[in-house]
Image: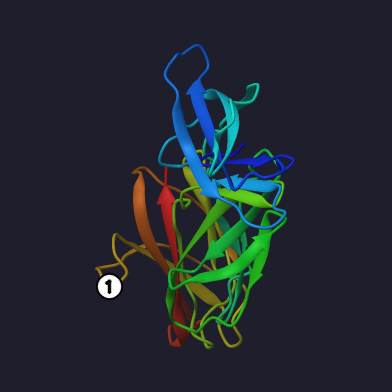
Amino acid sequence: MYCDKANFRFINVSGATGYRIFAKKSGSTTQQIISSRNLTGNTSYFEVCSNMVLDLDTTYDFSISAYNADGETAQSATITGKTLTEPIAPTGLTLTDITSTGCTLSWNAVSGNNKYDVYDGGGRYAYNVSGTSTSISSLSPGYTYDFTVITKRFVDDYFDESDDSTALTVITPASDAPQHFVGTASSGQVQFTWSKLTGANRYDIYKSTSQNGTYDKCFGTTETSIDWIYYASGTYYFKIVASTSGGDTVGSPSYVVLKLP
């Protein structure tokens, strides 16, 4: 049993030219035909794509009859099966190792026999990932990507898909910008980290509510990490600007998008 389909295997009845599969909710007297199909050859495998007639997370009693030009058999003894709930979309998407051309995307595991597909906003990037992270490569510097992940729960040779996860946005830095700029929000503060940029010995971080909006300076430091206490939740764009001790800007800014709880 799956979310939206049921598969049936049975031994072919000699002389039968087709089969009908019946279903009723357990405890109900209302029965419906969920599939009727003519078969040719020695087929003994019957698949029903039943998303239009079967409810999720519901127990059904199934039976089958065979027919040919002379008539139809009585229905078989019933078997019972329960459709599944839809898989849950992954949560906790996190980006690390952000460079001009790549990053690492990770997420929380979803319980079950699952694999995952990763999308980058323009199509599927990774297919049937068995773990909870994947390395993203071949990105373009200075572009915005919205990554999402779906859960694929496998049963036999088939799978059910979850909805998309909440999107996680990354803005790849220019090649002359500070690399690996990330922020991790927790308990009212954000920890920012980045890699040292050649020629720079000071870094200033600014905050805005949009990528092209007005940025307000949060703080400056000569280190490559800092903790910052925030007071307002929401989605914010942060940029880091590297400079020399004399105040001359070095390279281009890097950006990170954070949803502060």
Q: Is residue 222 at least partly visible in the picture?
A: no
**Quadrant (top left, top right, bottom left, bottom right) of the C terminus:** top left
Q: What amino acid is labelled 1 in the image?
A: Asn
Q: Left or right of 207: which side holds 66?
A: right
Which residue sits furthest top? 27
Give 254 or 11, whichever is nearer the viewer. 11
Give 241 or 57, whichever is nearer the viewer. 57
Q: Is residue 53 at least partly visible in the picture?
A: yes
Residue drawn where x is 43% and y is 69% of the image: 121
How far across and how far down the image is residue 218, in percent?
39, 60
How far across and how far down the image is residue 112, in percent?
69, 39
Which quarter of the picture shows residue 252?
bottom left
Q: Left or right of 217: which side holds 154?
A: right
Q: Secondary structure at mark 1?
A: loop
Give 218 or 166, whichever is nearer the viewer. 166
Q: Which class describes the residues within 10 Å of circle 1: few (<14), some (14-19), or many (20+)? A: few
How far across and how far down the image is residue 82, in percent?
59, 27
Q: Is residue 183 above or below residue 243?
A: above
**Quadrant (top left, top right, bottom left, bottom right) of the N terminus:** top right
Give 176 or 42, whichever is nearer the viewer. 42
Which residue sits furthest left? 214
Q: Is residue 251 above or below residue 167?
A: below
How far across and how far down the image is residue 140, in percent?
50, 84
Q: Give the colour scheme of this rendering.
A: rainbow
How many marks the image carries: the answer is 1
Residue drawn where x is 69% and y is 52% of the image: 43
* Residue linked to disc 1: 212
